[in-house]
Amino acid sequence: MPSLNWIGKDAVVHHHKEAPFHLLKCNEKLSVMPKTSEVFAKHPRNKVEGAETSEVSGNLLVQGDNLLALKALLPHYAGQVKCIYIDPPYNTGEEGWTYNDKVSSPQISRWLGQIVGRENEDMTRHDKWLCMMYPRLSLLKELLRDDGVLFISIDEFEVANLRLLLNEVFGFSNDMGCLVWKRRSSSAMSGTPLSIDHEYILVFAKDKNKISLYGLGKGVENYPYRDERGFYASTDLTVGMDRNARPGQYYQIANPRTGTVYEPNPERVWRFFPETMNKVIESDLIIWPDEQDGNMQRPRYKTYFDPENLKPTPISSWIESAGISEKDIANQEAEYELSILTTGMNQEGGKLLQKIFGTKTFSYPKPVSLVKSLVRSATRGDDLVMDSFAGSGTTGHAVLQMNKEDGGNRRFILVEMDENISKNITAERLKRVSQGYEWKDQKGNKKKEEGLGGGFRFCELGETLFDSQGQIQKEVTFEDLARHVYFTETGVPLPERLPKSQRLRKSEASPLLGIHNGVAVYLLYNGILKDKSRNGGNVLTRPLLAELPEHDGAKVIYGNGALLSENTLRSLNITFRQVPYEIKIS
């Protein structure tokens, strides 16, 4: 398989493993918590513990370097994200861009100098961009579920490099393909007779054999009609089959209200046999031409929106920017809308953001309809969605809107590096769209936009778990260290709740963190057993061992020390790791 090489590659290939773990601290003042009656609050991960806790669940906005933020999120969400959408810097060299597409922002430049070293002086902006992307993509892969999917927006400037980079990180066999999105309606010369009016969206799976995608037609916005039974679309009542091949499906049907008689096109037949068709007609599942305005020639079928019973539908690599009107759907013979993503253009994103804030606040935000198309094609129910280049917060907005439309309980995690953008644009946008906001039309009349519901927690990167000497920071709580220890020991996040049988007492935290592949992991730290003396809660002794929740199998116990011999530990099938020296720190 072809590989990509660039200045600084050797320094960044393993950097995601070497980056330190940071604490995540919630800023309650910038958080917007939903009412407990809302769907959002029903998920067990949405419990709010208070401003000082590092518990991060439900919808989340993290402010900080996305490399460090992704690393901090691993103990909480490794292997749990169903869909990732990112819109990274395109590296076009436009200095006026909010994210500085030359990748020469102070944070990135400082990071490159520290990690890459002297080679940084000879790097082109392509080298810098690839150095920036590689470790971040590596961490995103670790956060994806086995059936998860990654969507990345990019233009022609770095698309070739990005695809080779993704092939290296995710594997060539997990390359799902490339979507094409028309981003604007009017052409622009831009110094060349070729107008580039489209962008690309690269699609990669964690494991291509485990993923399914759904066509946009399964989204409620493509069911434009509504009656007492719900939203429905007008779909073809015939199938492409010659009547000689299916004579039993070529017959006449009549509108029971008007008596008008219809038969299929000679090259097609009805999709149902007569007995089933009679039940369909009796159930009022037919749209009759003689009861409609327009050019509809033959009866069509009502297909109702049912998010609980959806089947995977291959999606086309072409994203139809113009959308599909109700009239188009009503007259469409082939149901191509089930497999073609439909979305607005860049202009839509800018107009919506200006409506929300009353002024232009962010350059070239992606349209909500684009992100909805992608996220809906990959998620259902309470799936977790992530965007580590959050910008103005379009992905979070899209998730809230989808949940409002189809009753889902999807959750999002957003990461935004720029403090000003994250607090004054991203967080503020999410607050306004979740709670509702006022806006003015072209005549200056005030309008009220209804809130979408939901909310989010605003978190910032705290201290690292360990100081420069490898000692545990004073701010680190038992829960903080427990998440880190369990993740570095097992590679999976700490279980949310232990069975009652594994707790010491119902109202007390347990030194037993969890059981993974038959191995129980324990942590003796910070007085978990209410005794910090030499012979007490942080040192493994015979009496203390008898107090631990039982496990019939191998045990890994972390503590300050052990007063049991190596032979005794082996005979009891115990591996002891001393805190802090035997805890992985990156």
Image (spheres, rainbow, N blue to C red):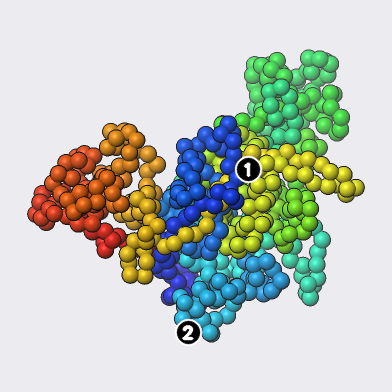
x and y, in percent, of residue 394 in the image:
65, 52
516 versus 305 height, above or below: below
Location of mark 1 (residue): 400
Of the residues shown, which amino acid type is indicated by label 2? Arg
x and y, in percent, of residue 39 in the image:
57, 34
Give the quarter of the image for residue 467.
bottom left
Location of mark 2 (residue): 118
Task: Give the quarter of the figure containing the C terminus.
Answer: bottom left
x and y, in percent, of residue 391 in the image:
64, 59
Label 2 element class? helix
Residue nearest the viewer, comparing 457 with 184: 457
Given contact means CB atoms under 8 Å apart, are the residues at marks 1 and 2 in contact?
Answer: no
432 versus 68 height, above or below: above
Label 1 vs label 2: CA separation?
Answer: 45 Å
Q: Residue at x 81, y 37 (%)?
A: 327
x and y, in percent, of residue 61 in the image:
56, 52
Q: Residue at x 69, y 46 (%)?
A: 432
Give the quarter of the image for residue 249.
top right
In the picture, measured across the screen, residue 517 lies left or right of residue 73, that is left
